[in-house]
Image (spheres, grey):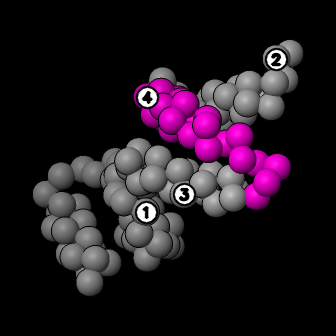
Amino acid sequence: MEKIGFTRCMDYLIDKVKVKEVVTDGHLQIAALMRNAAKYKGIEHQNDKWNGSKTLTKMIMKAAKSKENKVLIDWMPAIRNRFWFSSRICNGDEKALKATLLDMLLHIVNHHE
């Protein structure tokens, strides 16, 4: 249902305005549609930060269930805040986003060089 609504909306918008970028939630069918449909080539697709933060939190909490990763639970608020900060300052540059997040991970494991 979400994919159908998205397609109808995009087709309507493409006829009215020049669409350069679309930000959606993490719906897999929409991501696949944006990646594979010829009519959407040239339109950048990104997931919104809120869903990215939610997914990151779930992944870290899953990893924190193992004994050797328990420390991640204490770091969770800082990791989530760093994700939001990194998303804001990276200006769409994926490498810059990864670099600022990696800095945080190095800090967690006490590697400061």
| Mark 2, secondary structure of its residue | loop
Q: Earlier in the sequence, mark 3 or mark 4?
A: 3
Q: Amino acid at mark 4?
A: Arg
The residue under label 2 is 112
The residue at 35%/52% (across/down) is: 23
In this rendering, the answer to whether 2 lies above or below 93 is: below
Alpha carbon of mark 3 to alpha carbon of mark 4: how far?
A: 21 Å
Q: Amino acid at mark 2?
A: His
Residue 6 position within the rendered picture, expressed as x and y whole percent measured from the top left: 26, 71
Front tag of 1 and 2 = 2
Residues in magenta? 66-88
The residue under label 1 is 26
Q: Earlier in the sequence, mark 1 or mark 4?
A: 1
The residue under label 4 is 88
Front tag of 2 and 4 = 2
Alpha carbon of mark 1 to alpha carbon of mark 4: how far?
A: 18 Å
Residue 48 position within the rendered picture, expressed as x and y whole percent measured from the top left: 38, 49
Residue situated in front as seen by the camera: 56 or 2? 56
| Mark 4, secondary structure of its residue | helix
The residue under label 3 is 58
Residue 17 position within the rendered picture, expressed as x and y whole percent measured from the top left: 18, 52
